[in-house]
Amino acid sequence: MKFFVDTADTNDIRELAVTGLLDGVTTNPSLIHKAGRDFLDVVKEICAIVPGPVSAEVVALDHETMMKEAEILRRIADNVAVKVPLTLDGLKTCRKLTADGTMVNVTLCFSANQALLAAKAGATFVSPFVGRHDDVGFDGMQLISDIRLIYDNYDFATEILVASIRHPVHVLESAKLGADVATMPPAVIRQLVKHPLTDKGIEGFLADWAKTGQKIS
Ligand code: E4P
């Protein structure tokens, strides 16, 4: 499963990129607002840090304007994945862009039927939002399971990019269900590495090592 980080904070992205664990980045208009920087500048900077797909979202709602915005976004770098909303205009835009060889991430997916449409439109990625689905009383992970089944039934190449991840259990369940990508806030990526028994084990080993009086040199 690929790991994307869901942020527009370039300091966090740089820090995580050097670990070699990062396969891509997702942004959205809210994350750009939080970063407080010029959208195009920040996308350009992220694309230079991470060679994998970097999602940048259009904000228009009609196909024609979406295409104009997509044109600007895809010119930033070859690794830009244009993010479009799961609407008819978004799907139409997706079809057109992927036919031209541009990566497209169809976002705000909340049903398996919507994911089926994204695959039929040739999406590179579909982004089901598990956390927001849980928030309104649905089972976000069931959505991932349903999409996996449907995509496998028809051999769709669209990658399931699990979005709106809130905690490590979402990541674990995504991996168990065979999701292709998980996009996570930086804090969740950092949480994945932590285990109290790992910390306790290191502490114990180092205490005993100090008693040996030896050095590795
Ligand atoms: C995905 O691409 C979105 O940017 C993101 O995962 C949304 O997450 P949220 O529900 O925590 O805002």
Image: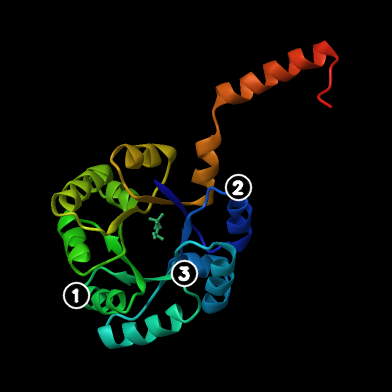
Residue 102 on image: x %, y %: 36, 74
Residue at x 56%, y 72% (from the top left corner): 42
Give the quadrant of residue 175: top left
Residue 132 on image: x %, y %: 32, 52
- Of the numbered discs 3 and 1, the one sitting upstream in the chain is 3
Q: Which residue matches tag 1?
A: 88
Residue at x 32%, y 87% (from the top left corner): 65
C-alpha distance separating marks 2 and 3: 20 Å
Is 198 located above or below residue 5 in the figure?
A: above
Residue at x 22%, y 72% (from the top left corner): 87
Is 197 located above or below residue 77 in the figure?
A: above
Residue 64 on image: x %, y %: 28, 88
User: Judging from the image, what secondary structure is the residue with disc 1 in?
Assistant: helix
- Foreground mark, 3 or 1, reads 3
Q: Which residue matches tag 2?
A: 19
Query: Which amino acid, by three-letter code, is at mark 1?
Result: Leu
Query: Which amino acid, by three-letter code, is at mark 3?
Result: Asn
- Foreground mark, 1 or 2, reads 2
C-alpha distance separating marks 1 and 2: 39 Å
Packing grade of label 2 (10 A; few <14, some 14-19, many >=20) is few
Residue at x 28%, y 51% (from the top left corner): 133
**Distance from mark 1 CB to nearest ligand 1 atom below 8 Å:** no
- Of the numbered discs 1 and 2, the one sitting upstream in the chain is 2
- Of the numbered discs 2 and 3, the one sitting upstream in the chain is 2
Residue closest to the far front: 217
Give the quadrant of residue 122: bottom left
C-alpha distance separating marks 3 and 1: 25 Å
The answer to whether residue 19 is left or right of residue 56 is right
Residue 185 on image: x %, y %: 48, 51
Q: Which residue matches tag 3?
A: 79
User: Judging from the image, what secondary structure is the residue with disc 2 in?
Assistant: loop
The answer to whether residue 81 is left or right of residue 137 is right
